Amino acid sequence: MATAAAAAPRTSGIRFGRAARRYGWTIAVYALFAVLMVVTLIIKPDYGAFEWNTLTLAALPLAFAATAQTIVVLSGGIDLSVGPLMALANVLALRAMLGHDLGYSLIVALIVLLEVTLAGALNGAIIVLTRVPDIVITLATSFIWAGLALLVLAKPTPGVPFDFQNLAQGSTLSAWIPNALLLLLVIPLVWIPLRRSRAGLAIYAVGSDRNAAFRSGVNLGLSRVLAYAVGGFFAACGGLALSMTTGVGSPLAGTYYTLSGVSAIVLGGVSLAGGRGGMLGPVAAAYILSLIPAVLIYLGIDPNYGQMIQGVLIVIVVMIGGLGVVLRRA
Amino acid sequence: MSSRAAATARIVQQNSIIVLIALLVALAGLIEVIRPGAVNANWVSNILEFAAPLGILAAGQTLVVITGGIDLSVANVATAAAYIMASQAPFGVTRGIVAGLLVGVVVGLVNGVGVAVFRVQPLIMTLAMGLVVTGTLNVYSQAAVRSVPGVPAVIHTLGSGTVLEYVPVSLFLWAVLAAVLIIGLRGTGFGRLLYALGDNQEATRLAGVRGWQVLLTNYMACGLLSAVAGIVLAGTVNAADLSLANILLLPSVAAVVIGGTSIFGGSGSYSGTAVGALILTVLNSVLTLLDVPDAVKQVLYGAIIVLLAAAYTRVLGRD
């Protein structure tokens, strides 16, 4: 990094250094993804559009889970109920869509998005009003959402309308640009206008220094509730993505996505202390975390190792990140 | 706040354990109202038996929360310890128990190294280690164990046997551990260092404390206690499957919070947590008596924890 900066002309050198510091982690995450893809191609030379499509399908719900967690963490909170919120959206959608056509399903999807956004906002409102730490409230509400999901649907049930599933499962544009990849566009469509707005800036401000934000006239409570609401919206997207990619309404699908979502944002370079990070890193991290089990299968290794390797990878990544902090201090 | 309210808050603050016990008695009273005659010696014995594993699991959690951390791997560790204990027991019960406890110590060590040396946020470190433990356990169960292992008789007695008809054997273990924790936290240098670290790590460092050694030991203690809890739980339910203790993760944190230990660290006690574990167990018993479906039970459980935590924070004026 230093040599590259020195080689470049002086003024752009400063700019490059700053950009490298700011986006370095994100770039590293994309590089890691690229390396993993190359490794995959070496292991499995006939890796084709079908496998790529499978990967995008597996990564879609996780990418949304990571996005939902990111926005909450940026505001200085943490939402351990992302997974159950996804499961709730997933089963609500299935119950209402069962046996209907695409138009009806889309209306259902919109209503589900609204409902689960409100559930997310409720998370935030409870935290702000009771002043109980985020982690305690969302751990408790995770039980509430999971219980509600079980009430809506007692056991995994197939029956998501095929036209609705095809929104994610097909490849309308080209074989290498599956719909599941295009659906990720929902993230920038919501996120970029939000980040550029006053409200988005306020979310970053609240996350990085609550006192300073308060003294600058930011409405702390409102900003935090907004972050949780947007988190709920993305969790709903994740639940609908689950409906599309699996075709099943599954009330217990949640647990995996809470943990993996947090893993993805840590790998994606979002600071758990709040106020620092973006959406690009976590989405790439979601792809990395989804690619690992596939690579294991190509290698002929028991996919049961997947969870273990995911955990080890995260431990190593956060330890390296932590080491950086320790060394800078020393 | 009016002066009367302030006075109430002060009384509650200074005697939070009494308030908690009052809540416990009120819940038991509620059960008696719902079903007269339900609260008898047998019921108390059952409550204590089921509260013991949770209380021990929450003991580890209390130690970590006092230092300002959180351990989200306690339930995974408990499950893994119980499973490995049961699968190794055919080669000797002692070997099984040692192997199970070792799981807790090793995972605690790794957690401790991550948090204390590499300065990883406890939430992330323990979440990731939880993944590693569960993943490894799955691999182990497929590779090394052909069938679901049975629980050895000694552990079964430890978890669900009774003395004098009504006193659960596990209560003795719990009582000993509780005494060690309560006295250790208040009366030893190590205990006081935990509070100091939770209150202000920088000040503790400037005072010449090697904080990382304390934290490392603490996470190992938490791992060990989780393993003990898992083994006792395996005895209580007389089974050691791959998701044995996983449902106890939220209750372990909830017991600590209800017991009055600040999630930000620096204050709290194990006596509060122990009563918190009893309250949660009685609450579960209330919900079971009401005969509500599991899903509703889950919703109510979550809602009540929100209410309890909110009431507690409100009364104590903490944030």
Image (spheres, coloured by chain):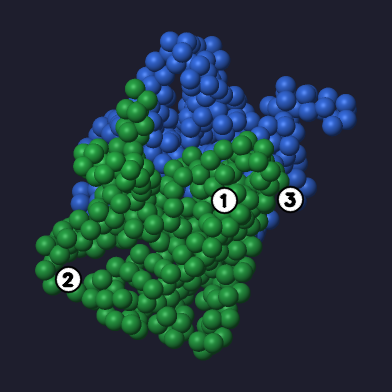
Chain colours: A green, B blue
**Residue position for label 2:** A47
Q: Does residue A267 appear left or right of residue B29 in this picture?
A: left
Residue type at tag 2? Tyr
Instruction: Pinpoint residue B136: horizontal percent, then vertical percent.
Output: 28, 47
Task: Give the camera-side residue of B124 and B301.
Answer: B124
Instruction: Pinpoint residue A217: horizontal percent, then vertical percent.
Output: 68, 43
**Residue position for label 3:** B35
Point 11% across, 68% down: residue? A45
Task: Give the camera-side residue of B141 and B290.
Answer: B141
Task: Give the camera-side residue of B252 and A286.
Answer: A286
Task: Give the camera-side residue of A289 and A220.
Answer: A220
Instruction: Pinpoint residue A194: horizontal percent, then vertical percent.
Output: 55, 60
Q: CA distance from mark 3 to mark 1?
A: 55 Å
Q: Residues within 10 Å of mark 3 (few under 14, many from 20)?
A: few
Q: CA distance from mark 2 to mark 3?
A: 64 Å
**Residue position for label 1:** A201
